[in-house]
Image: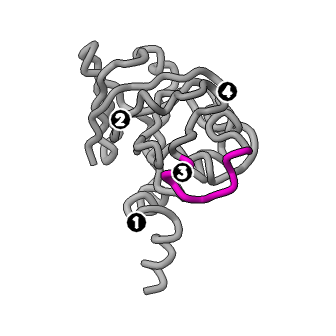
Amino acid sequence: MKVNGTAHKVGDHIDTDAIIPARFLVTTDSKELGANCMEGLEAGWVKRVKENDVMVGGVNFGCGSSREHAPISILGAGIPVVIAHSFARIFYRNGFNMGLVLLEIGDDIAKFSDTDQVEVDTATGQIKNITTGETIQAAPVPPFMQEILDAGGLVEYGKNKLA
């Protein structure tokens, strides 16, 4: 899948409480959660987001409590891909389990600014910053995790395996 959109850059150590504060955890509806995505960071943040935009995180993105609501809210906001320096491990698994593409690019994250236009090829992990003309290669997604993504998340993956 190719994703073309605007980069929305956030900082280091963005925790799941910033992604979706606890007061919004009364639902699992992706659109409701998406409407409140990043409310713990900045009120109204999601109003800048358009379908297929890309979130750009720093070090240890998704740290904090283990809640599947965080990746669901990102997807519900219309963001299918997060690129970051690195991800908290539990968020990394939760993200893939929910069908959210997560790509690690280490220090190359500095090559992206807020509002850059980006193109992400999720199959190859190639990320092109259209604004600067630079192309970055993300760390490869483990094959098993790619199978989960291809199925649309862990639940669908399990259903397919049992069918």
Q: Specify whether 16 is left or right of 159.
A: right
Tell me the quarter of the image containing the C terminus.
bottom left
Residue at left offset 54%, top offset 23%? 10
What residue is shown with label 1?
A: 151
Q: Specify whether 53 is left or right of 39.
A: left
Say which element carries label 3.
helix
Kindly report the distance in space between the C-alpha atoms of the residues bearing marks 3 and 2. 16 Å
Say which element carries label 1.
helix
Labels 3 and 2: the sequence-earlier one:
3
What residue is shown with label 4?
A: 13
Q: Which residues are magenta?
A: 23-33
Nearer-the-camera pick, 12 or 105: 12
Kindly report the distance in space between the C-alpha atoms of the residues bearing marks 2 and 4. 24 Å
What residue is shown with label 3?
A: 32
Judge whether residue 119 is colored magenta.
Answer: no
Q: Nearer the viewer, mark 2 or mark 4?
A: 2
Kindly report the distance in space between the C-alpha atoms of the residues bearing marks 1 and 4. 29 Å
- Label annotation for residue 50: 2
Horizontal and vertical percent position of residue 71? 56, 47
Pointer 4 with pointer 3, Cβ within 8 A: no
Q: Amino acid at mark 1?
A: Ala
Q: Nearer the viewer, mark 1 or mark 3?
A: 3
Horizontal and vertical percent position of residue 126? 31, 34
Labels 4 and 3: the sequence-earlier one:
4
Q: Label 4 crowding class (10 Å Cα cut-off): few <14, some 14-19, many 20+?
A: some
Judge whether residue 28 is colored magenta.
Answer: yes
Q: Label 2 crowding class (10 Å Cα cut-off): few <14, some 14-19, many 20+?
A: few
Residue at left offset 40%, top offset 43%? 78
